[in-house]
Image: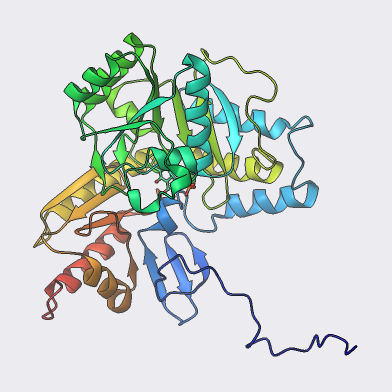
Amino acid sequence: MKPPDFNLNPLTFSMEIFNVYPLLDLEPVKAKGAYVYCQDGNKYLDFYGGHAVISIGHSHPHYVNKISEQLQNIGFYSNSVQNPLQKKFAQKLGQLSGYDDYQIFFSNSGAESVENALKMASFQNSRSKVISFDKAFHGRTSNALGVTDDERYRAPINENNKVVFLDFNDLVGLDHELNKGDISAVVIEPIQGIGGIRVFDDVFLQQARELCKEHNTVLICDEIQSGAGRTGKFFAHQHAGIKPDIITIAKGIGNGFPFAATLLSPDFEPWYGQLGSTFGGNHLACTAATAVLEVIEDEQLIRNAAEVGSYFKQQLSDLPQIKEVRGRGLMLGVEFPFPVKKLRQKLIEEEQVVTGVSSNPNVLRLLPPLNITRKETDQFINAMQNALEQPQPLQ
Ligand SMILES: Cc1ncc(COP(=O)(O)O)c(C=O)c1O
């Protein structure tokens, strides 16, 4: 028999990337602070942070040093041994967020932390029905997808969820559903990200808090995008002065290192095996996330997010052709009376500025690093002015 030929032409026989992402024509090779440097030799101002992930800026020296140092010692061991790095992170998180009486369960992605939140709610009250809201996005695993308001992503195997979708800020609907007495959890992004930067009314959140308490329903705030100081408070729900029973975190808390967690009020009592994860809370992940918290604290980035955020919001509101600017701190959405696809492309190609989009085609999503300066927001505004003044139609 002829031996197999291992010198096959790699161009003819190479594994394909499963093609599910429409890609921007950008190939970042290096990044620093608010900038990414691409293969094409250009430097781009990054007001997107790769889906709201970059919080303390790209390649922050403290973050790089801490991760590099940790890697020299131990990068990983599973949750079967003592890991004081978990306690160190939890202590810092409790102190910075004001939730030092809560418990933490570590995982790796946003969807996982939502999945665990929904599961814990169901363990707690032995119910299985959940309330979510229109345009919500909570992730792509089965239960997280169940409470995501986008049917396109749901395969038949994901259809076994018992979820009631209510209109945004619909207090009457919420009251009506909770009165039935069978709702396990209400899951809310205090500021919807992918839904187009929509801010829930403080009064709605306060009432939701009260109603959930009254009906033994677990209130879950998904702070995966809005947490880690982005909105000018550690968590976006803190603007409304409420305390949810469960909080989910991911994205900015790791600044790019895969890290997520579910925070649980003292009412939840764990038992061995109730939740689990191989990688969750590993040495390198905890080091990365602790470094993020240290930078947030040392550089007072929550204050910066509030201050530069309100300056930036005002600047954006003064631009021509804008319908509305929404959001808090450095989690901002700019709505135009036309689809933003061409504008976003122009910003990349002609102004070297990267922005995000949302499920609303008319909204640009802006998520710069929390240490962005006024000078950099001025630069962004200049770029927007140029792009909006161009003679070619943007619609
Ligand atoms: C609010 C919110 N929840 C959950 C998720 C899912 O996170 P991940 O993609 O890490 O699973 C996202 C992701 O964009 C999100 O914005």
Residue 138 image point, x, y percent: 40, 41
Please name the residue shown 69% across and 90% down the image.
Answer: 9
Q: Is 306 placed above or below 129 here?
A: below
Residue 141 image point, x, y percent: 50, 44
Looking at the image, which is closer to me, 231 or 142? 142
Q: Is 267 placed above or below 383 here?
A: above
Give residue 89's quadrant in the image. top right
Total number of numbered labels?
0
Q: Is residue 272 left or right of residue 387?
A: right
Report whether residue 100 is seen. Answer: no
Looking at the image, which is closer to me, 123 or 77? 123
Q: Is residue 301 left or right of residue 180?
A: right
Give residue 343's quadrant in the image. bottom left
Q: Residue furthest right?
A: 1
Please name the residue shown 33% across and 16% down the image.
Answer: 212
Report whether residue 94 is seen. Answer: yes
Q: What is the quadrant of the N terminus in the image?
A: bottom right
Q: Is 337 placed above or below 133 here?
A: below
Q: Is residue 379 left or right of residue 220?
A: left
Q: Is 183 placed above or below 12 here?
A: above
Please name the residue shown 23% across and 26% down the image.
Answer: 202
Give residue 179's quadrant in the image. top left
Looking at the image, which is closer to me, 224 or 176? 176
Please name the residue shown 24% across and 68% down the image.
Answer: 341
Q: What is the quadrant of the C terminus in the image?
A: bottom left
Residue 108 image point, x, y percent: 58, 43
Q: Is residue 103 left or right of residue 82?
A: left
